[in-house]
Amino acid sequence: MVALVQRVRHASVNIDGVAAGSIRQGLLILLGVHRDDSKREAEWIARKCANLRVFSDDDGKMNLSVKDIGGEALVVSQFTLYGDVRRGNRPSFEPAAPPEKAEQLYDYFVELLDGHLESSVQRGVFGASMDVELLNDGPVTLWIERMNETD
C-alpha cells in the first residue's frame, strides 16, 4: 500500500462539478492499494498518516501531527500510484489490486484514519473520475509505502 501524503491549506474533490469532499488545513492522502496488500498494511499506514509530524510548532519546526493541530484529512483512491513504467511508455497497472479488493482496503483505511482523528475524514468516490484541487502547504509531500511481508 502506498500513500502520497500532502500537507495542504485546503483540498477538495469534485465529480462532474459536484463537491464530494473538502477539507481545510490538514492532509490530502492519495491512496494506492497493491495486489498483495492486507489489512495489516492499511493499519500501519493509517497510524503513520495520523501521527506524521509535518505541521509547524511555535518554533517553526515540523513537530506537530494533523491530530495535534485539529486538522482534517481527505483520502482519494488512486490506483495509478502503482503504474509501472519501466518498460515502454504506457503504464502497466498489474501491481495494483483488483477493484473489489482495493475498494475494501480503501474503505478500511478511511475507517481506521477516521478513528485516529477528531474530525471526520472526507473522501473521494472509489473508481470515479475526480477533479482534485489543493493548495499544497510548503510544499510538503511524502511517499509512505508498506509492502506485505509474505515470508
Image (spheres, rainbow, N blue to C red):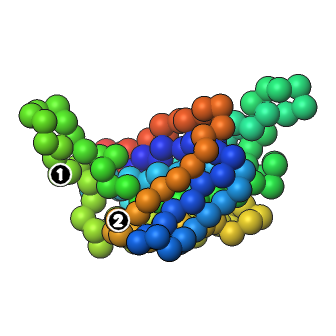
Rendered view: 38 above or below 17: above
The x, y position of residue 21, in whole percent, is 57, 68
Q: Which mark is residue 129?
A: 2
The x, y position of residue 146, in whole percent, is 43, 44
Residue occupying image coordinates x 60% and y 54%: 11
Residue occupying image coordinates x 34% and y 46%: 81
Instruction: Say what amino acid the circle numbered 1 marks.
Output: Glu
Residue occupying image coordinates x 16% and y 31%: 86
| Within-10-Å neighbours for mark 2: few <14, some 14–19, many 20+ | few
Q: Residue furthest front?
A: 17
The x, y position of residue 62, in whole percent, is 75, 30
Q: Quadrant of residue 79?
A: bottom left
Instruction: Say what amino acid the circle numbered 2 marks.
Output: Ser
Relative side of 52 to 111, left or right: right
Say which element carries label 2.
loop
Q: Is residue 43 visible?
A: no
Relative side of 57 to 26, left or right: right
- Front one among 23 and 69: 23
Relative side of 21 to 26, left or right: left
The nearer-to-camera label among 1 and 2 is 2
Which quadrant does the C terminus fall into? Answer: top left
| Within-10-Å neighbours for mark 1: few <14, some 14–19, many 20+ | few
Say which element carries label 1.
loop
Residue occupying image coordinates x 54% and y 71%: 19
The x, y position of residue 98, in whole percent, is 24, 65
Rendered view: 148 above or below 129: above
Residue at which label 1 appears: 94
- Front one among 51 and 150: 51
Rendered view: 58 above or below 38: above
